[in-house]
Image (tube, grey):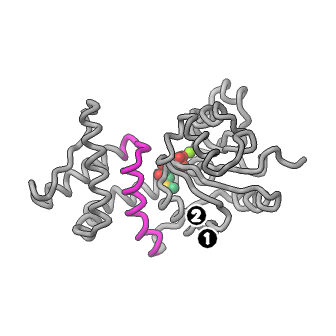
Amino acid sequence: MSPTYNTVILDIEGTTTPITFVKDVLFPYVTSGLYKFLTDTWGATELKQHVELLRQQAELDAEAGMKQAVLIPHETHSNADQVKAAIQQSIEWQMREDRKIGPLKSFQGYMWKSGYETGELQGQVYDDVVPALDRWKADGCKIYIYSSGSVPAQKLLFGHSEKGDLLPYFSGHFDTSIGSKIESSSYNAIARAISIQPSEILFVSDNVKEIIAAEEAGFQTVISDRPGNAPLSAKDRANHKVVTAFDQI
Ligand SMILES: CSCCC(=O)C(=O)COP(=O)(O)O
Ligand SMILES: [Mg+2]
């Protein structure tokens, strides 16, 4: 039977890629190398741009009453070591909380770039993903990514994957700059951006809140239940299509 969708949008962590790759490889790459990275890149224009975004976010968080928020001083008011220490503290608490917030995600992508380029990092993708990408392409479907990881970080992961450069499969990438993954308005915005009716789009994710938001926007959905993902309730399984691999889609 031919699919009832002409567009597939994929989440990454817990869907195309094991959560362990993110938690045990990508995140420790940031936390363990952070101070050296800041020291090596200190003064670089791109670093300054990322730090400014982290600073603005910390101010918003403090204004919103978040006690853990770490304000990042300007270098003119403080010495470089104090600024670096504040950046490190800010990133560490946000990563402990696994915040899916733009400035943090952009900074992570900035750091991962050198790791992918040297070959120290290689994106992990489940074995059943590439055959499904081939099948969807053969059926004439367009394939997109929507992840909390920044668009540059997504491109690094798929461009430097263990399965080779997978970027040619994708017609585009979305991150939380289009909106939160648990808000239905974000899915409407994506449908508008790619000029496809929501009912013609299949969204695959491990996160039930994202699945519900996509369904509210009129998308077709499938929950990805990979090893190590958060457990699904009996209600989740009763209310949604669940797969353990893409060959079941
Ligand atoms: C592509 S960057 C690594 C993944 C990441 O940082 C992340 O937050 C992924 O979240 P997702 O929305 O793909 O579950
Ligand atoms: Mg996910």
Query: Disc 1 residue type?
Result: Asp
Q: Position of residue 7 (x, y in %)?
A: 72, 50
Q: Residues within 10 Å of mark 1 (few under 14, many from 20)?
A: some
Q: Label 1, label 2: how many angstroms apart (C-alpha)? A: 6 Å
**Within the magenta stretch, is there residue 216?**
no
Q: Is residue 44 visible?
A: yes
Residue 211 as seen in the image, left or right of residue 74? right
Q: Is residue 22 visible?
A: no
* In contact (CB < 8 Å): disc 1 and disc 2: yes
What residue does disc 2 label?
A: 158
Q: Is residue 224 above or below residue 131?
A: above
The residue segment tinted magenta is: 95-118
Q: What residue is drawn where x is 76% and y is 55%? A: 141
**Within the magenta stretch, is there residue 116?**
yes
> In terms of secondary structure, where does tag 1 sit?
loop
Q: Quadrant of residue 191?
A: top right
> In terms of secondary structure, where does tag 2 sit?
helix
Q: Residues within 10 Å of mark 2 (few under 14, many from 20)?
A: many
Q: Nearer the viewer, residue 1 or 172?
A: 172
Q: Which mark is residue 165?
A: 1
Q: Residue furthest bottom?
A: 118
Q: Is residue 151 above or below residue 206?
A: below
* Quadrant in which ligand 2 is drawn: top right
Query: Disc 2 residue type?
Result: Phe
Q: What residue is drawn where x is 14% and y is 58%? A: 75
Q: Position of residue 115 (x, y in %)?
A: 43, 69
Residue 94 as seen in the image, left or right of residue 204? left
Circle nearer the N terminus (1, 2): 2
Q: Position of residue 56 (x, y in %)?
A: 27, 46
